[in-house]
Image (cartoon, rainbow, N blue to C red):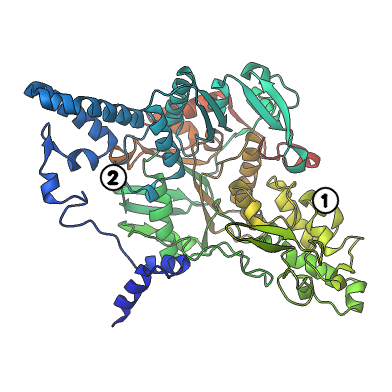
Amino acid sequence: KGVIPMLDSQFASPTTSSARKKRLSKYRLTTICSECNGARLNSFALSAKLGGFSWDQIACVDATVALERLSIMKKRIANEGNPKVLAIAERPLEEVEQRLRVLCDLGLGYLGLNRAAGTLSGGESRRIKLASRLGTTMSGVIYVLDEPSIGLHSRDNTKLLDALERLRDHGNTVIVVEHDEATIKRADWVVDFGPLAGELGGKVVFEGRYEDLLKSEYSITGQYLSGVRVMNTPSSRRPGSGQLLELKGAKSHNLKGVDLTIKLGTMTVLTGISGSGKSTLMNLVLQSALVDRVGKRKFQKESSSDLEDNAPEEESFVVSEQASYQSFTGHENVDKVITIDQSPIGRTPKSNAATYTGLFDEIRAAFSRTTAARIRGLQAGDFSFNKAGGRCESCKGQGHTTVSMQFLPDVLAPCTVCDAKRYSEIVLAVSYNQATIADVLNMTVREALEHFKGVSKIESKLIALQEVGLGYIRIGQPAPTLSGGEAQRVKLATELCRKSTGKTVYLIDEPTTGLSFYDVHLLMVALQELVNRGNTVVMIEHNMDVIRCADYIVDLGPEGGNEGGLIVAEGTPEEVAANFPDSRTAPFLREALMAHPPRAQAPRAPVPAAAAGAGSS
């Protein structure tokens, strides 16, 4: 039968697991059909024309092109003067034109109308859903949007806010969960939660108009907006180590043979309009070039024998499409490349921040050294809830049992044998500073830091977690319950704990997604620390607070889609703001620098340590 036919049949089989199909998909390539050229219809259907245009000439082009052709089509139909055609086409064409106009108003004019849904970013998907609502004249509807500004350039965000206000003006109610400053400013009513995160939050600390929010003593959000709390712009930019990463002739998707230069030892931010080619340049071309030359290291706890589930999915960094570039130099000055994203740190409840960072290894070792553990012959492995011996065998260390509900989703019930503590009685009889291993897993990072004070190996990891604003999460909190921002900061804390070589390149795609002003401040302090150690951070970002704190900016554009794919500006934030009129980022960056001029002050945490851990509010 042959290997390839066998693999094809496995891929097509309905009994093949999704994991297996994902592995096989790495060796498959999607090509455009030579018969229909990607139009999906046969020649007979494509021969039908309206106003001189066939179906594929409207449905298989960018939204802006389709809108232009639709206008031409309407004029041609009107000039022909066929009353039957006019009666049939007039209403549908108006409806299509209105929806296309809404897409363009939301900054999605660069998207091909035949673009596969799976290739859309989260921000693009949200705006398309919003466009489907804005294209109607419904009223009396409540719209709930969860961070619609994610992935949007400041210019596109203005268009989005205009669209939301039109929804409101049509008699609808719009409820938005958002951290974006422009959105908060234009809101009719603001409700702020806090004051901190986790158990220290959950309260409404303010509700009212934006002007009153600026005066609130209890709102951290209001304090950042009013300038009481500020993330200072650096007074000088790092020159770098003098070594460069130079990627020349990058071509893929809409990139037009751009030359990218990264100064090693600096923080470089890729900016630009949505769809301008930032993700393609960093995540596809630059990453694949680095992986080819340097090799990759996935995010997993390589030294931990406690938990294998923390390893990310196998296909995480597979380049699905051939990245094209002419040359790549300077990679010999890099020893590893690491991507810090918001993907989960684990897929099952057995994964948590302690197992991911290696903290749990040290905690188990500390328990195994106690007198009570030695008397009972317990070793570090016995304090693992993943191995037989010390775990509760009734729930296999899960802390709960699964109750099948027939036609309803399964229900998780606390284990009645260990009372959801995961461990056997002999293990729970051992305590460290009057706390069992189950008690420690239930502690917050802040509480554990006090409990293990003086134990350097444990203390250093807990301090790293607290410094990135995770003082409120519990040591044993299951990974699936962590948000994307929390998972990303766990990864960042892990890197802060590692011994730095000063030759690592970190690739980070929009790290501020879902983060409050306070969280962004903590994130930037941590990222600046990585760069201070000699490492290089390359990130994609739209947040002006992050962009103004960068050492170097590479701005792509000038627009999205086919009108993008070029580097229109590069330099320090001050240089980009002052010298590049074609940059869509420059005007907004100029405003940010005027509002927050550079100050000579070292980066530091925004609040005292006692209050660290305040999260999204």
Q: Residue at x 58, y 40 (%)?
A: 514
Q: CA distance from mark 2 to mark 1?
A: 53 Å
Disc with the residue nearer the chain's start (2 vs 1)? 2
Which mark, by number, is residue 55?
Answer: none
Name of the residue lying farthest toward the bottom? 1
Q: Position of residue 443 (x, y in %)?
A: 80, 53
**Could you tell me which quadrant the C terminus lies in?**
top right
> In the displayed structure, does residue 108 sit left or right of residue 43?
right
Mark 1 = which residue?
447
Name the quadrant of the N terminus: bottom left
Q: Is residue 336 above or below residue 370?
A: above
Classify residue 529 as left or right of residue 5: right
Secondary structure at numbered mark 2: loop
Q: Which residue is mark 2?
A: 114
Relative to the observer, which residue lies in front, 18 or 394?
394
Identify the residue shown where x is 36% and y is 35%. 108
- Please give left or right for residue 486 compared with residue 153 in the image: right
Q: Is residue 98 visible?
A: yes
At x 74%, y 76%, the residue is 388
Tell me the kind of residue under disc 1: Glu
